[in-house]
Amino acid sequence: MFEKFAQLPADPILGLMAAFRTDTNPHKVDLGVGVYKDPTGNTPVLSAVKLAEQVCLDEETTKAYIGPAGDAGFNDAMTTVVFGAEALATQDDRIRTVQTPGGCGALRMAGELIKRALPNATMWVSDPTWAYHTPLFEGAGLTLKTYPYFDAQNGTVRFDDMMECLNQVKAGDVVLFHGCCHNPTGVDLSNAQWDEVVQLATKSEFLPFVDLAYQGFGDGLNEDAYGVRALAAQVPEMIVAVSCSKNFGLYRERTGAVMLVSPSSESANAALSQQLNIIRGNYSMPPAHGAAIVRIILADPKLREDWQTELKLMRDRIRDLRVLFADKMQQRGVERDFSFITRQKGMFSFLGISEQQVERLRTEYSIYIAPPSRINIAGINDANVDYLADAIASVL
Ligand SMILES: Cc1ncc(COP(=O)(O)O)c(C=O)c1O
């Protein structure tokens, strides 16, 4: 059987990571892979996480199975982080949360749930969207189509075009939104635009699906959940896929959740039973460690405060780097105006340079950028920003 296989090309981002690792240029810069980095280029373990791990180690009394829904304490606490305590009180017990292996696990399991309920549904994703949405949802058997989203000329949202397209989406289709910090463009909907989306979703009866992978990386934990909460307050049903990879720095612990909002408590229980059945027939149960850490942090007022302080530090650093980078480009006197970078949110932005220029940055300067020209802002630091700005100015 194995002889039938042709060798596949390396995954574009993982291939970039591997090439960066073996590059011997001492000035090399990694702006490719989507992980937060501190000023020294390290992706740190948050101190709240370290402390919670110690508690976990001391308190853990068994390694017995935790079941397909995962850690109940984690599920409850994360539901509150996402929907907010006040909103939850008025939701009439309509939300069911299941712990998953990372945000990817949540996206895939929810995709399979959609396929089970709506086998002919089309899923509408933004143009562009995170590259892995395609294999995750197509792997679940869904058909994907795009709606207009990114205005490359102005670095903003093509909101009118987007709304015109979503107006045509038929009831029973699914529309995927990025909750905040759009990956790969960094361009988010304003609160007023979210309100219009909510109105449309209520009227059109498509199923809203929000991918919330960067809560706390944009404007704050509550601010970044504006869209999710505005939708949940109005629509009868929706799905949210959550990742704790970035905001808790738990990348390799594979910690996330899928949250199902249903019209009633009864339908919520039925949807939950289907989701658990899908999980049982797939990876069976999620890993325990990451969710235990999150549960411990969120249950302890001091650890929770420490975590929020560290999250704010990451958020503020990214925002400052956006300003620093745009200033450095302006100082280089390049014709192109890079100030759009300062108005975007989260770790990513499109530089808006050609594929050849991206290639030249890699081969001539050892600067690694994900195609077509997505940069991870957190990969910039005081030590590399001038080298980076000089190199970009020279290829432009
Ligand atoms: C838009 C988006 N969704 C979901 C994820 C899932 O992340 P993970 O599976 O690592 O939690 C990511 C990670 O980069 C992402 O960028």
Image: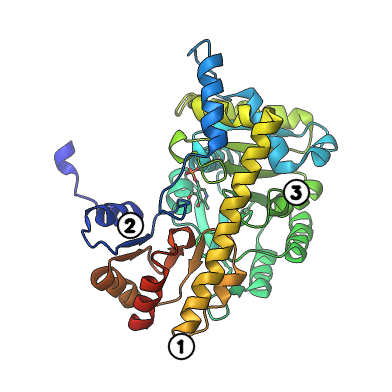
Considering only vertical position in the picture, is 2 above or below 24?
A: above
Is the residue indicated by label 3 positioned so its CB lies within 8 Å of ligand 1?
no
Q: Which colour scheme is used?
A: rainbow
CA distance for labels 2 and 3: 34 Å
Q: Which of 255 and 279 is in front in this view?
A: 255
Left or right of 37? Residue 67 is: right
Closer to the eye: label 2 or 1 = 1
Q: Position of residue 72 (x, y in %)?
A: 64, 23
Assign a secondary structure to mark 2: helix
Assign a secondary structure to mark 1: loop
**Which residue bears the numbered disc 2?**
12
Q: Which amino acid does label 3 sit on?
A: Arg
Crowdedness near tag 3: few (<14), some (14–19) or many (≥20) residues, C-alpha within 10 Å: some
Q: Which of 70 and 94 is in front in this view?
A: 70
Which residue of the protein is positioned furthest toward the left in this rendering?
3
Residue drawn at point x = 44 percent, y = 84 percent: 332
Q: Where is residue 27 in the image (x, y as percent from the top left)?
A: 29, 64
Assign a secondary structure to mark 3: helix
CA distance for labels 1 and 3: 43 Å
Considering only vertical position in the picture, is 265 above or below 22?
A: above
Q: Position of residue 292 (x, y in %)?
A: 56, 26
Q: Do the residues labelled 2 and 3 touch (CB within 8 Å)?
A: no
**Which residue bears the numbered disc 3?**
229
Q: Can residue 278 be seen in this view?
A: no
**Which residue bears the numbered disc 1?**
333
Residue drawn at point x = 68 percent, y = 28 percent: 300
Quadrant where the image shows the C terminus: bottom left
